[in-house]
Image (cartoon, rainbow, N blue to C red):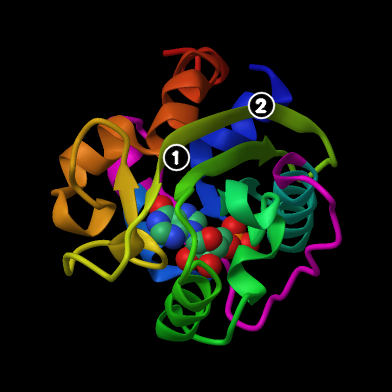
Amino acid sequence: MHEQTKYLKSCLVIASGNVGKIYEFRRLLADFPLTIHGQPEGLHVEETGNTFLENARLKALAVANATGKCSLADDSGLSVDHLAGAPGVHSARYASTDEGRISRLLREMETCKNRSAHFSSAICIASPNNEILLEVEGRCEGLITNKPRGSKGFGYDPIFEVLDTGLTFAEMGIEKKQLLSHRGRAFALLKPGLTNLLQL
Ligand code: IMP
């Protein structure tokens, strides 16, 4: 058996402390014969990359190294056209809470007519011997709403209306979000490689 496949057979650690993200990955990975773990408490990885992919690699490699198990990391964020792509890779650091991040973004967009934005997700799976096994990127186009709508999901979900749906991520069920979202689209690209790695 290939060394990486052996590591992956045992389990996959999701390199994130974000409860919303871990929930989505547990669902996306439900059909794979993998035991899913969250990353160990207290482990913090500095996101020093300039792109989503660089940060996903950093997180996956660091967590695989720390745990001795294969790790899947997602680096994601919201890029707003009017703000020249901000908050982008700084989406998590835009303010200290989801409410704070949403208020800041709506404030900065107050008088703005161009509401175009997109979510990006880079997913990377790394092995404990410092190898990148798989990496993909997905994107979802939409608009920043004038005020929050809906109560599902996490993060910026209540103020991101998915193009051609009339619904924010927070107004749709998880199935619909996973079909249309940046993370769902990235995961669809990851699936064949993961199936192959697991020799399914
Ligand atoms: P990361 O954990 O460094 O990738 O940070 C991602 C940031 O973007 C966090 O602030 C998340 O709340 C936000 N984010 C990423 N994906 C989503 C999503 O699907 N919905 C809403 N916010 C998201």
Residue 16 on image: x %, y %: 56, 63
Tell me the residue at 56%/41% (across/down).
Answer: 120
Label 2 and label 1: CA atoms lie apart by: 15 Å
Q: Is residue 12 above or below residue 179?
A: below
Q: Which amino acid lies under the numbered mark 1 shown in the image of this protein?
A: Arg
Return the residue at label 1.
183
Q: Is residue 84 left or right of residue 31?
A: right
Q: In the image, residue 111 lies at what x, y percent?
A: 47, 68
Sequence order check: which comes first, mark 2 or mark 1? 2
- Judging depth in this view, the residue of 174 and 143 nearest the camera is 143
Whether residue 89 is visible, yes or no, is yes
Cβ at disc 1 under 8 Å from ligand 1:
yes
Amino acid type of the residue tagged 2 in the rendering: Leu
Query: Residue 134 lies in what quarter of the image?
Result: top right
Residues 196 and 53: in front is: 53
Residue under label 2, please give it: 134
Task: Tell me where residue 126 sits by quadrant.
Answer: top right
Please name the predominant secondary structure of the magenta segment in the image: loop
Q: Which residues lie in the magenta part? A: 25-53
In the displayed structure, 171 sits above or below 93; it is above
Label 1 neighbour load within 10 Å: few <14, some 14-19, many 20+: many
Element type where label 2 sits in the image: strand
Residue at 32 percent across and 35 percent down: it is: 163
Identify the secondary structure beneath mark 1.
Answer: helix
Kindly identify the residue that appears in the image at 78 percent across and 45 percent down: 51
Residue 162 x %, y %: 31, 41
- The vertical placement of 154 against 181, above or below, is below
Tell me the residue at 44%/81% (across/down). Answer: 103
